Each structure stands twice: as structure tokens, then as C-alpha cells.
Amino acid sequence: MDTLKNALKGTFEVYNLTTVRQGLVFTRGEFMVHPKIPDKSTTANPPKLLDQVRDKLRVKHYSIRTEQTYSDWIKRYIYYHGKRHPKDMGAREIEAFLTHLAVEGKVAASTQNLAKSSILFLYREVLEIQLPWLENVTQAKAPKRLPVVLTVSEVQDLLSRLTGTHSLIASLLYGGGMRLMEAVRLRVKDVEFSRHEILVREGKGFKDRVTMLPESV
């Protein structure tokens, strides 16, 4: 328990963290102001398309990683069609781009779905354009693989090779079922040592939940 308490008092310098909360970026244990999107009411020119995308994503409380990923796929979609504005394109161009990813790019099904989600967000949430059903897309094939499950002895051997903060976080991930960023953001006040519980704040879907505190920590 003392190991966990001591680790939570400091900052996890070994991680390069980035997360947006109310216009702030937390990186390597320090807060700094997140780059602001120009105010539509005070700028002479309307904000650029990608700025509008980032604005909408932040309003809907998407994570900084999702913001970066969506922006990247939207940019790739625009460049693929010779920098044409998305307003001048539609379902045919989207289908061509997604098919290109599967056929020429040979991307995984999850990657193609992520690109599709990014582009649909652009049209539905930013441009407010409803698209027809994209039925002419060549779907990337999702491989069927069996999960790799480590035995108890293999897990113990793996954890025994870690030290310090790495060992603590790995124990929380394995013993408490926490995600990486949930463990990194953990605070002392979120740990109930007497009840052996951890309160995970703003987990996936921005929902709080309670999980167990592993006895090993």
C-alpha cells in the first residue's frame, strides 16, 4: 500500500501524457494552455475546416487522441481527392477513398472503420450533411485470431521483471482491470484502502466506475 501512496504523490515522468480537460493539456506532469481555436465572432475570416472539426470534437468531449486521429484521416481524405473541399464531394468519393485503403493500402478492418468514422463525423457533425448508405465500399477483411492468454506463472514472471512505477502500473492494469490512462491519472483520493476499491473517474465513455484494488500493491 505504501508503494502505491508514494507513487501517487509524484508525477509519472516516464510517460508523455496528453489529455484535454477544460482547455488545458496535461503533459509530463505540468499543465499548459491548450491551443485555442479562433473565436468565430471575432475573426474576420471563418475558421478553417480542421479547426471546425477540432472545435466540434472538444464540444462533444472527445479525447485528444481521437481529435488527432480524426483530423489526420480527414486530411488524408482531402489530399487523396486533390485537396477538393468535402462540401464538393459525397458518397462516391468517400467510397473510393475507403476502397483504396482496403485494396491498395491493405489496411486492417479496424483501420478502415476508423477512417470511415472520421469522415462521417466531418459530414454529419461539422458540415451537417446527411450521406446515403455507403454500400459500394470494398470492406477490409478482419482476421480471425484466437486471443493470447498468459498463464498465472507467466504473468508473475512478467511482473517480477518490472520495477518502480512500471511495476505499480502493470499491477493495477492486471489486478484491477484498469486501462493505461486510467491508471496513470489515478489520484490518492480515488483509492479506498480500507475497502480495497479504486474509483475510476471519467473512464471510457466518460463514465465513473469502481474496481478492485489488487492486494499485491
Image: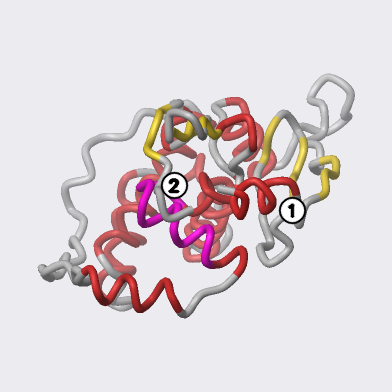
Q: Is residue 169 magenta?
A: yes
Q: In screen coordinates, is 75 left or right of 150?
A: right
How far apart marks 1 and 2 lie (CA) works out to: 33 Å
- Residue 89, given in percent of the width and then of the height, sits at 44, 46
Q: Residues within 10 Å of mark 1 (few under 14, many from 20)?
A: some
Q: In the displayed structure, would residue 41 be above or below residue 117?
A: above
- Classed neighbour count for the residue bearing mark 2: other residues with Cα under 10 Å, few (<14), some (14–19), many (≥20): many
Q: Where residue 28 appears, x then y in whole percent?
A: 76, 57
Q: Which residues are magenta?
A: 167-179
Residue at image mark 2? 118
Q: Earlier in the sequence, mark 1 or mark 2?
A: 1
Left or right position of 134 against 182: left
Residue 79 figure quarter: bottom right
Which residue is drawn at the image coordinates 64% and 42% (left, top)? 49
Label annotation for residue 199: none
Residue at screen point 76% across, 33% down: 23
Residue 175 lies in the magenta stretch: yes
Q: Residue 93 appears in which quarter of the rendering?
A: bottom left
Residue on which disc 1 sits: 11
| Image coords of residue 43 (percent x, y) | 87, 29
Helix, strand or loop for disc 1: loop
Amino acid type shown at disc 1: Thr
Q: Residue at x 57, y 34 (%)?
A: 57
Q: Position of residue 85 (x, y in %)?
A: 56, 48
